[in-house]
Image: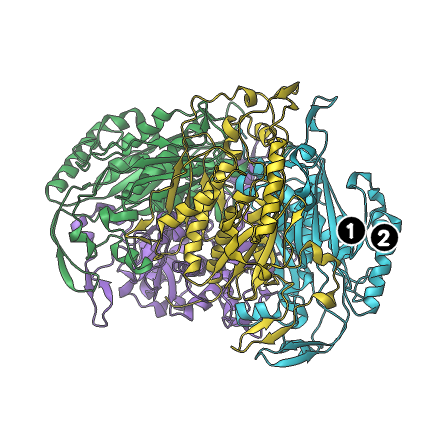
Chain colours: A purple, B green, C yellow, D cyan
Amino acid sequence: MNTFGNIFRLTSFGESHGTAVGGVIDGMPAGIPIDIDDIQRQLDRRRPGQSDITTSRSEADKVELLSGIFEGKTTGTPIAFEVRNADHHSADYSNVRSCFRPSHADFTYTTKYGLRDYRGGGRSSARETISRVVGGALAMQALRSVGVSITAFTRSVGNIQLSGTWDTLDFSLIEQNPVRCPDMDTARLMTDLIRRVKADGDTIGGVIECVICGCPPGLGEPVFGKLHAMLGSAMLSINAAKGFDYGMGFDGTAMRGSESVDRFHTDPDGNIRTSSNYSGGIQGGISNGMPIYFRVAFKPVATLLRDVETVDASGNPTVLHARGRHDPCVLPRAVPIVEAMAAMTLLDAWLMNQTTHLHKP
Amino acid sequence: MNTFGNIFRLTSFGESHGTAVGGVIDGMPAGIPIDIDDIQRQLDRRRPGQSDITTSRSEADKVELLSGIFEGKTTGTPIAFEVRNADHHSADYSNVRSCFRPSHADFTYTTKYGLRDYRGGGRSSARETISRVVGGALAMQALRSVGVSITAFTRSVGNIQLSGTWDTLDFSLIEQNPVRCPDMDTARLMTDLIRRVKADGDTIGGVIECVICGCPPGLGEPVFGKLHAMLGSAMLSINAAKGFDYGMGFDGTAMRGSESVDRFHTDPDGNIRTSSNYSGGIQGGISNGMPIYFRVAFKPVATLLRDVETVDASGNPTVLHARGRHDPCVLPRAVPIVEAMAAMTLLDAWLMNQTTHLHKP
Amino acid sequence: MNTFGNIFRLTSFGESHGTAVGGVIDGMPAGIPIDIDDIQRQLDRRRPGQSDITTSRSEADKVELLSGIFEGKTTGTPIAFEVRNADHHSADYSNVRSCFRPSHADFTYTTKYGLRDYRGGGRSSARETISRVVGGALAMQALRSVGVSITAFTRSVGNIQLSGTWDTLDFSLIEQNPVRCPDMDTARLMTDLIRRVKADGDTIGGVIECVICGCPPGLGEPVFGKLHAMLGSAMLSINAAKGFDYGMGFDGTAMRGSESVDRFHTDPDGNIRTSSNYSGGIQGGISNGMPIYFRVAFKPVATLLRDVETVDASGNPTVLHARGRHDPCVLPRAVPIVEAMAAMTLLDAWLMNQTTHLHKP
Amino acid sequence: MNTFGNIFRLTSFGESHGTAVGGVIDGMPAGIPIDIDDIQRQLDRRRPGQSDITTSRSEADKVELLSGIFEGKTTGTPIAFEVRNADHHSADYSNVRSCFRPSHADFTYTTKYGLRDYRGGGRSSARETISRVVGGALAMQALRSVGVSITAFTRSVGNIQLSGTWDTLDFSLIEQNPVRCPDMDTARLMTDLIRRVKADGDTIGGVIECVICGCPPGLGEPVFGKLHAMLGSAMLSINAAKGFDYGMGFDGTAMRGSESVDRFHTDPDGNIRTSSNYSGGIQGGISNGMPIYFRVAFKPVATLLRDVETVDASGNPTVLHARGRHDPCVLPRAVPIVEAMAAMTLLDAWLMNQTTHLHKP
């Protein structure tokens, strides 16, 4: 279950403090020109140490591609890649080796597998998302060639919420502030909150919103492969994600049908469009050509800079002493991960949709 | 993509007004005693016409099992089942044949496939959920034999919201009222609201909550097969679902880490438990032995008892005249569907978990 | 594991003496006109009782389609179908209930599942191939629309072997004799042998050859999804199959490379072809545009009209008394099954190949 | 389609002259002690340059494991591995860049993908089998812990055929001669033949036989996942494979049922066994506890040390000049690859079988 997708498939590997993290992408369409610098740029957006509101750990995270690209183009064969981990050999893990950190995966991994690589969280570390970002960057390059764009941003941090629907926002501002919010004033409030939380040795959650433009109608497979079910599964698989909704979402449960149906009309170019977009660009599980938008809830991460009471592997009480560096809020670094998962999901749905009718080659 | 699951798999088929709807279940464990009456009871819970707040259509929906059960037990071979549709031959579909109902799948199916079975919504009809309920009833019988129980209920309808965490509620009341809410006063308010909405020819949405008890630690596959990602995908695939969250969910995004970590302790029986359960029974994508709970948002359905302006297949304006009967609110009938999808997901995760270690047969 | 295929998928169900056998086809391309009579004709080719060299059991095996076809065309939604079994309620299974027939699946099913439906072989009965023939007939109708033809015939029965490569044979003769051999003299020898074997209460095996013409280059996925590996798996999954080879096959192991490489040339239409076809139309796992041909070995079936010594479920010696009717040789009835599996495999490979490049819809 | 298996899955990557070849293994059971030296030993058995009858190319092929193993044991997380390719930058590929080698994958890859990495055969090179051998070595270590052994050997080279059933042979001799044949006299004849063929600049094919001992009854999924269909698909996916049969195989087609049924008896330990084993250890697609044996046909490879007439990418005639080094016969190096594919198939079937019944964890 370390493979994501049906036609376009990412198989991910690696532990936080093992030799390398990386992945293999299978089903990438052939003949797509690849910009390796752009892949590294996406990785740099998720890199620790990029601002004072992310962890102060600093890792270069340089990606190396091992196969599947020839003379600058995809060949249709698997694209393997890896990011070597820095040398952690001298590190001291005695504090986590024999105890279960609260609200982490230590207990569940140990119970399921009988053992775990406890160094830096092992496989359950968010370092695993490196492979998602690389996979997403490759998918995004394919999608861009057919006119699709995907943009995520921070919608809320704690109680600080950005107001206004996504189409009223200036996306060019997203990368202008460390929290990746497309409004400079709100971004400042969010950043201040994160700094205060960090000073307390605490953490805080929030919501990321993502918008997909340029998606043609027809993507998504009805019933169990509904496009929003695929997107939801993709987003919920990201570390610390606790919820997903799309279009009118949870708020729409309080609306009446007469307020929220999306009336059809024909636009000047002869395309059938809807006047409103409460559906979120998806009807019956299939894209309808309108923008797709959704939200992902992220919890406050569980690593606190405080001593925490817990139990050891035998169930005896113990105290886990605060140590090291951590992200007080995952949202800024999760923005490129949400985009990456959206890109892989959409490319996969796109390729599946190419099998709807029979064509002569 | 009409197959759900990895080891335990439901393949669903059927259109609203075709010959039959049904499915095939593969990967059902062998040797499970099957109570066919119980399957029918579950179907009766989703049946139209069961109360004055559901559609007044009345269909018997009698299920027939075609294979896979011998002398009252599962044999490990596929279990096929079907519910024959009533004879709709004389029906008049001229009003929907050539126009796209707003916020339905008419436009997207036609665009994707080039044609659609327009009778009663065809494949996009909620009649498809019959196969989910049968599949879920079979999965539930297997899970019950290993001590798992799954209960869903209506948490909110429009702005009427049931307060209190699930563990403060009396689940024995759920089937005592037509809206399936475990509080009789709130149920009455919800029912009244639905009646008013119905009188207006309108519809209303809401939220269903679901609780899984008795799930052992270890279920769920890390990374892309996280248990909550599987549950989310399952729930979002239900007609009219717009969102999913679990544990502290969207509300938890405003919490601090220090408030929301679940401390471990050892209970009197020597089991490691958590004192709180903001995690929702899942940590790192794997069940931790605590109850699993989640919420699903349902939109107000788009079928109104009012004339609606729309376009026809050529994009020309037309008016769709109100006709027929419909559900003013899907929630009461969606409760058994949520339970069914949860049961199939959990059984699938259970069986996958049986492959974690190598055993001699 | 009762599902075959990746994009075009058949999920099969049913036991010999259960309520029905059938299946669900998912991933069928939309918009294909369907000739239901042709499906029934293919079923009639595998029907028992069609000649004096097949079993004298006579079952009508009428197929009913339950979904997925509207106004004569596929809609892209699942096509479910079933063949109701005749009423076997009064039959007496006491002779097989508590003993293991040699070289049947009785022992292995009981060991694996802990129980088995022993009536008429249950799920291990060749009656299961009904669903393959229906699935194949539907796939064949799609393939025919893009110029592909698939023809199988009996190459050998026991030591009676048809000589000459397939391209020297007159395929119009295949349905002119009960053994389905495209040479009337050889067919007569084969038929005589089968009659003699039957008179002995014995059985005999043989080889079926199959030829696919009109397949364009490009089908098949390299490495694990090689077209011949997919075909091999499909053929070996047929009851009584013991071997598969393609192109020069086992005989080619004695050849030298210099004798057996297929030289390229350009034909008058400008297409690149090979002068010989030892490759069997597949190179590197991908079709090269030349005819694809392969062979399938079938064992003599194990049901003899003789008393057989065996053991019962407790391992104690017992004698199984000869009873009933059986096929002395499966080959005549297996010819349409081989064609059906080839059609489903090829259509699946065709649809997968449609995802090799990214296209705008 | 670069992933093999259902539960135990190998995803393979890499081109002959790219940066690396390797793979990711997912679904490996947790807690298995791993002997990395043994993996390297298996790789050394497939290494080029190991004797005068294999290619004289010499590559070290040192494997590096990147993840999934901790303190000497598998953790249940993906095991990634790679073998870096030697530096081929200075090589001259002008002779193959613009022409299609006969009976290679040059033409089909170019037609399918629109481009190909032509250096050393790219993805279609047998160098890809490195990932199979590593995957197989890991699977074999798991299987050994539950008492399974897998042994392959060269049964024939050209017309030189080893006689006698496998159980009459001395497997300790297999690694005592370069052709991997368990009879020293036959091995000498085979080696002499390969040397003569090599001196001619030609190539020769042959048959490898493989035997699995210690497999318990119950492995394999009926209908499409029959154990021999899984094995057949695995073997046919190996480069140069042209055929597969098991048990009585193609030879059995000339037998009568009365000669070839495998009678049951109870052995002194109370286990039900068969007196003969024409079934090849598999009945109804499920292992019956007897040894499993099968054969794989390999063609003479198409790379000749002779000038060959062919066409270029435009279809114009050209001559491909002989160059470089090659294997005159793939069989000696294919023996460990057959074993590896058998090990991965069997472990996958073993793990799937663990889902047949529901167990409490």
Which amino acid is tagged 2? Ala
Q: Which of the labelled discs sits on residue D154, or is there none? A: 1
State the residue in front, A139 or A100.
Answer: A139
The chain that hosts pointer 2 is D
Question: Which structural element holds mark 1?
Answer: strand
How far apart are labels 2 and 1 at the CA level?
9 Å
**Quarter where residue C13 is shown:** top left
On the question of residue B78 being in view, the answer is yes
Residue D262 located left or right of residue A283: right
Q: Residue placed at 25% from the left, 47% from the top?
A: B299
Residue A68 located left or right of residue D208: left
Q: Which of the labelled discs sits on residue C361, or is there none? A: none
| Up/down of B128 relative to B216, above or below | below
Q: Are marks 2 and 1 in contact (CB under 8 Å)?
A: yes
Query: Residue C67: horizontal and vertical position, in percent?
Result: 33, 45
Query: Residue B332: horizontal and vertical position, in percent?
Result: 25, 35
Compare marks 2 and 1 and give the one earlier in the sequence.
Answer: 1
Query: Mark 2 highlights which residue?
Result: D187
The chain that hosts pointer 1 is D
State the residue in front, A267 or D319.
Answer: D319
Which amino acid is tagged 1? Thr
